[in-house]
Image (cartoon, rainbow, N blue to C red):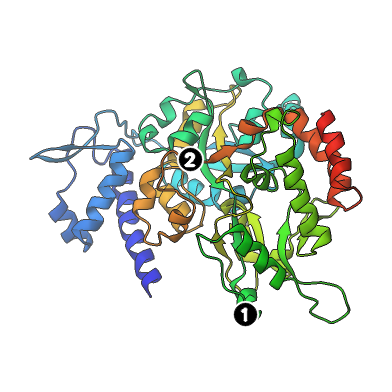
C-alpha cells in the first residue's frame, strides 16, 4: 500500500510538471509571463501545495522558470516557445554496445520524457557488439549511417581512439553540474571539457538469496560482516542436494570478468602498477580464488555460450551469493523466480574498496542535429527523470539530490552513496590503466579459471606481462 501511495504522489507532481512544461514550450505561457500561483494550481488541479512545489522544482532545474520573490513564478526569458507551426518530423539515432542492461530498461524513461518535450522527434535505438563497438561504428559510417548519440561504458570511453571526434558537452549539463557526484563527471572530463555525460553508475557489490540462507539455516549477511563470516556462510551453503556425491548448490558464484574478480584483488592490496615489486597480494588473491573454486568447492563460475549468453547460477538458485552491479541486477530481478535478491557490501579482503562502472552519453561530431542531441542529454539528467530511473527502474542516479527523495535508504547507506566523494571506489583504468595489458591478462588466466593451472603457473605468466 505504501509503495502504491508513493507512486501515486510521484505521478501527481510529475504530471503537473509535464502540463506546465507543455504550456511553456508551446508558447501558451510566454517568456516573462507568470504562471498561476500555487494556490490557484492547487485549486484547479485538486492537488496539494507540496506537489505543486515539487513540480516547480523540476521546472527550475530545467531552467524553464525562475522565482520572483514576492511576485510569483515566471517563465525564464531564455525559453523560446514554438510559433504554432507543426515541426518537421525528425529522427534521433542512439547507438549502444550490446548487451546493455540500462539500454534495455533505463533508456525507456529518458525517451518518454524527451518525446513529451519533442513530440515531433522519433528516437531510434541501435545496438552493436560491445567487444568492437568502435570498429563497428567506423564500418557503419562508411555506409552513411551516423548516430546522433552513443551510449558508452567507462571502459569504452577510456579506450576511445580519438576524443576530438566528439562534441564537448559542458553546456548540456551546466544547469545540473553541481548536482552530479563530482567523481563521475570528472571521470569523463579532459582538460575541463566534458566529453561524455554519465546517466547511471554502480559500484560492484554482493547480492544474496535470502531464501537459500533461510532454507539451510544460515544467518543472513549484515552490512558489517567480516570475510570470515562470508567464507563460513559459503561453506554452509555449498551442498550436494541430490546425494550423488557432487556439490550442486554453491555458496558463491564468481565471474572471470575484470570488473568483478579484481574487487577481491583491490581489497587484498594488489597494486597492478607495481606487481613485479610486490607480487604477494596478487598471489594471495589468486590463491583465495583457487581455494574457493577447486579446493573448498564453495564457489562456481558463470558460464558463457557461443552466443555470449551468460548462465548465472545465482539467478537460477544454484548459488547463494554473487558479485554484481545495480545495472546488471535489475535484469536479474526480472529473471529470478521465487526469491528477492538483496544487496550487501563485499568483504573479500582486509581493505575497503570497490570498482565503479558507468554508462554515459556522447555526441559525435557527425551528429545531424547537435542541439537536439544535447536536449536529449538534458532530458536524461533532469532531476525528475533521474528520480524515476532510480525509484521505478532500480538504477542508481548520477545526481546526489535524488537520494534525498527516496524513502528506502538501506541500499544508499550500504553502497555509501551519501558520500559525494565515493571514497574507496575506483574505475578499472585507475588501478589498471593499460587496456592492452588487461586484455592479455584476461587471456592468460583462462586456463587458471578452468582449473588447469596452479597459482604459481599463472603468476609466472602474469609477471611477464
Residue at which label 1 appears: 217
Q: Does any portion of residue 297 appear in the rendered image? A: yes
Near-viewer residue (422 or 17): 422
Quarter placement of the C terminus? top right
The percent coordinates of residue 104 (x first, y second) are 61, 51
Q: Position of residue 434 (x, y in %)?
A: 71, 27
Residue situated furthest left in the rendering:
70
Q: Residues within 10 Å of mark 1 (few under 14, many from 20)?
A: few
210 or 423: nearer the viewer: 423
The structure residue drawn at horizontal position 65% and vertical position 20%, both measured from the top left corner, is 162
Quadrant showing the N terminus:
bottom left
Describe residue 205's horizontal placement relative to residue 455 as left or right: left
How far separated are the C-alphas under marks 2 and 1? 35 Å
Q: Residue at x 82, y 35 (%)?
A: 462
Residue 451 relative to residue 348: left or right? right
Q: Give percent across and percent down for residue 66.
A: 22, 36
Write the residue at 35% across / 34% down.
82
Q: Which residue is mark 2?
A: 423
* Image location (x, y in percent) of residue 77: 24, 29
Above or below — where is 133 with respect to 310? above
Q: Image check: 34 left or right of 204? A: left
Which of pointers 2 and 1 lies earlier in the amino acid sequence? 1
Amino acid at each position: 500500500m505504501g509503495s502504491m501511495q508513493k507512486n501515486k504522489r510521484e505521478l501527481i507532481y510529475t504530471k503537473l510538471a509535464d502540463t506546465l512544461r507543455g504550456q511553456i514550450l508551446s508558447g501558451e505561457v510566454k517568456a516573462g509571463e507568470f504562471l498561476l500561483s500555487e494556490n490557484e494550481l492547487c485549486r484547479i488541479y485538486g492537488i496539494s501545495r507540496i506537489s505543486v512545489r515539487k513540480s516547480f522544482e523540476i521546472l527550475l532545474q530545467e531552467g524553464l522558470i525562475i522565482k520572483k520573490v514576492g511576485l510569483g513564478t515566471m517563465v525564464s526569458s531564455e525559453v523560446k516557445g514554438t510559433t504554432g507551426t507543426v515541426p518537421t518530423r525528425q529522427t534521433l539515432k542512439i547507438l549502444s554496445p550490446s548487451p546493455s542492461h540500462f539500454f534495455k530498461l533505463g533508456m525507456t524513461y529518458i525517451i518518454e520524457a524527451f518525446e513529451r518535450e519533442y513530440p515531433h522527434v522519433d528516437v531510434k535505438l541501435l545496438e552493436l557488439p560491445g567487444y568492437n563497438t568502435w570498429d563497428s561504428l567506423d564500418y557503419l559510417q562508411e555506409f552513411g549511417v551516423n548516430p546522433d548519440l552513443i551510449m558508452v561504458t567507462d571502459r569504452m570511453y577510456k579506450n576511445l581512439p580519438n576524443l576530438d571526434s566528439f562534441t564537448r558537452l559542458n553546456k548540456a549539463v551546466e544547469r545540473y553540474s553541481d548536482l552530479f557526484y563530482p567523481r563521475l563527471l570528472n571521470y569523463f572530463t579532459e582538460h575541463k571539457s566534458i566529453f561524455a555525460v554519465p546517466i547511471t553508475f554502480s559500484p560492484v557489490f554482493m547480492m544474496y538469496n535470502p531464501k537459500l540462507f533461510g532454507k539451510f539455516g544460515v544467518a543472513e549477511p549484515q552490512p558489517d560482516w567480516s570475510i570470515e563470516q562470508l567464507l563460513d556462510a559459503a561453506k554452509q551453503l555449498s551442498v550436494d542436494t541430490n546425494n550423488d556425491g557432487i556439490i550442486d548448490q554453491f555458496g558463491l558464484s564468481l565471474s572471470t570478468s575484470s570488473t568483478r574478480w579484481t574487487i577481491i584483488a583491490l581489497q587484498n592490496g594488489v597494486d597492478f602498477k607495481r606487481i613485479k615489486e610486490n607480487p604477494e597480494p596478487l598471489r594471495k588473491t589468486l590463491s583465495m580464488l583457487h581455494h574457493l573454486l577447486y579446493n573448498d568447492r564453495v564457489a562456481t563460475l558463470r558460464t558463457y555460450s557461443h552466443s555470449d549468453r551468460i548462465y548465472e547460477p545465482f539467478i537460477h538458485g544454484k548459488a547463494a551469493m554473487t558479485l554484481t552491479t545495480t545495472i546488471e541486477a535489475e535484469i536479474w530481478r526480472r529473471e529470478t523466480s521465487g526469491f528477492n535478491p538483496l544487496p550487501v557490501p563485499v568483504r573479500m579482503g582486509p581493505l575497503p574498496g570497490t570498482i565503479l562502472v558507468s554508462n554515459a552519453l556522447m555526441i559525435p561530431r557527425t551528429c545531424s542535429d547537435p542541439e537536439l542531441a544535447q536536449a536529449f542529454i538534458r532530458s536524461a539528467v533532469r532531476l525528475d527523470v533521474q528520480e524515476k530511473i532510480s525509484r521505478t527502474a532500480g538504477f542508481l542516479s548520477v545526481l546526489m539530490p535524488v537520494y534525498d527523495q527516496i524513502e528506502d535508504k538501506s541500499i544508499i547507506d550500504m553502497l555509501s552513496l551519501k558520500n559525494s566523494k565515493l571514497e574507496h571506489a575506483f574505475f578499472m583504468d585507475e588501478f589498471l590503466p593499460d587496456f592492452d595489458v588487461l586484455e592479455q591478462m584476461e587471456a592468460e588466466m583462462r586456463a587458471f579459471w578452468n582449473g588447469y593451472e596452479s597459482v604459481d603457473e599463472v603468476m609466472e605468466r602474469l609477471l611477464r606481462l
